[in-house]
Image (tube, rainbow, N blue to C red):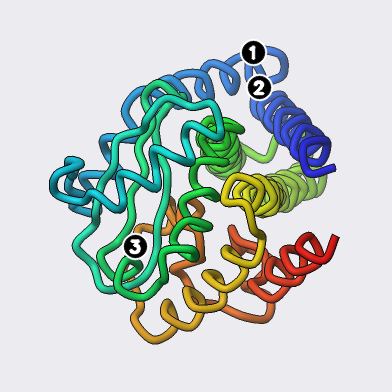
């Protein structure tokens, strides 16, 4: 179900991109929007893993330096049928983890020093299973595409707004031109908000899917359920400074917000994730 939901949301993002591009310049505007999105995707696809690892000062560790961590990752990778990813440790007391890389052959798993202090071996195994599930399902690629298309929509929508403001009202009379300007401003603003909401929904859907896949790899859904409860409490106690554009990569949301801000969250509620894992264990 999460897979189908992801595909539907990706189609909606693409349709929104075409529509906002055509609003800017008809057929040529739609083509421009596609070219822009493709160029952004190309750059992020090839270079985002190195950028994000450098951003958080992640340090690659050898098996001699972190034998237990390497052993867990290797065992889970073998169960998942994946090549052994590179292993990194982020020198940060905030407990969190993420996976990156453009495909399973060029993947990396990064954990903070804080998460290794906080979790038991079984709980850490659940977290690593979650991250390897992201790699297995190519969620990094899906998330990158969704983020760049949403970014392209926001960029093209901004161009359309400024073009409407400085390029004239676009009507034969003042009253009609003003109405057209207001319509363009409202529609492009709504399109930008819709793109962000769809991107967030895609990210939340992939988190549920990775929870399920990670629980199967680890062998017990309760490993990950217990880890998520500890990580949620730990993230509140020790905040982590992150770039909002990379927040969706982490296993628990390093950015905090409630109420209407939850609509723009890249992660599902921890309580719901734990409930689903516990129900999975019961089955």
Q: Nearer the viewer, mark 2 or mark 3?
A: 3
269 relative position to 115: left or right: right
- Residues 101 and 163: in front is 101
For mark 1, does the 10 Å Cα neighbourhood hold few (<14), some (14 to 19), or many (20 or more) residues?
few
Q: Which residue is mark 3?
A: 242
Q: Is any part of residue 149 visible from this angle?
A: no
Res. 28 mark? 1
Residue furthest bottom as drawn: 237
How far, Cα to Cα, is label 3 from label 1?
Answer: 37 Å
Indicate the quadrant where residue 96 lies.
Answer: bottom left
Looking at the image, do the residues carrying marks 1 and 2 touch, with CB atoms under 8 Å apart?
yes
Res. 25 mark? 2
- Residues 158 and 144: in front is 144
Q: Residue at x 68, y 50 (%)?
A: 185
Indicate the quadrant where residue 258 lies.
Answer: bottom right
Q: Position of residue 100 (x, y in %)?
A: 40, 39
For mark 2, does the 10 Å Cα neighbourhood hold few (<14), some (14 to 19), or many (20 or more) residues?
some
Looking at the image, do the residues carrying marks 2 and 3 touch, with CB atoms under 8 Å apart?
no
Q: Residue at x 79, y 49 (%)?
A: 179
Q: How many marks?
A: 3
How far, Cα to Cα, is label 2 from label 3?
Answer: 36 Å
- Residues 265 and 191: in front is 265
Which quadrant of the figure contains the N terminus? top right
Q: Residue at x 74, y 34 (%)?
A: 16
Looking at the image, do the residues carrying marks 3 and 1 touch, with CB atoms under 8 Å apart?
no
């Amino acid at each position: 179900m999460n897979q189908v939901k992801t595909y539907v949301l990706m189609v909606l993002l693409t349709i929104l991109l075409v529509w906002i591009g055509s609003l800017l310049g008809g057929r040529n505007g739609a083509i421009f929007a596609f070219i822009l999105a493709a160029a952004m995707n190309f750059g992020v696809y090839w270079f985002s893993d190195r950028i994000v690892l450098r951003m958080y000062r992640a340090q690659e560790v050898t098996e001699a330096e972190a034998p237990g961590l390497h052993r867990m990752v290797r065992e889970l990778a073998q169960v998942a049928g994946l090549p052994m990813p590179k292993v990194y440790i982020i020198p940060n007391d905030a407990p969190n983890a993420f996976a990156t890389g453009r495909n399973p052959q060029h993947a990396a798993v990064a954990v903070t020093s804080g998460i290794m202090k906080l979790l038991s071996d079984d709980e850490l195994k659940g977290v690593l299973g979650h991250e390897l599930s992201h790699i297995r399902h190519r969620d990094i690629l899906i998330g990158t595409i969704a983020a760049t298309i949403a970014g392209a929509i926001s960029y093209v929508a901004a161009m359309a707004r400024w073009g409407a403001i400085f390029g004239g009202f676009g009507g034969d009379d003042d009253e009609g031109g003003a109405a057209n300007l207001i319509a363009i401003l409202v529609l492009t603003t709504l399109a930008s908000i819709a793109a962000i909401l769809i991107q967030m929904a895609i990210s939340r859907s992939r988190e549920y899917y990775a929870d399920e896949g990670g629980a199967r790899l680890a062998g017990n859904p309760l490993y990950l359920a217990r880890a998520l409860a500890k990580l949620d409490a730990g993230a509140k106690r020790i905040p982590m400074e992150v770039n909002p554009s990379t927040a969706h990569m982490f296993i628990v949301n390093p950015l905090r917000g409630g109420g209407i801000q939850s609509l723009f969250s890249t992660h599902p509620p921890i309580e719901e994730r734990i409930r689903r894992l516990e129900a999975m264990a019961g089955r």
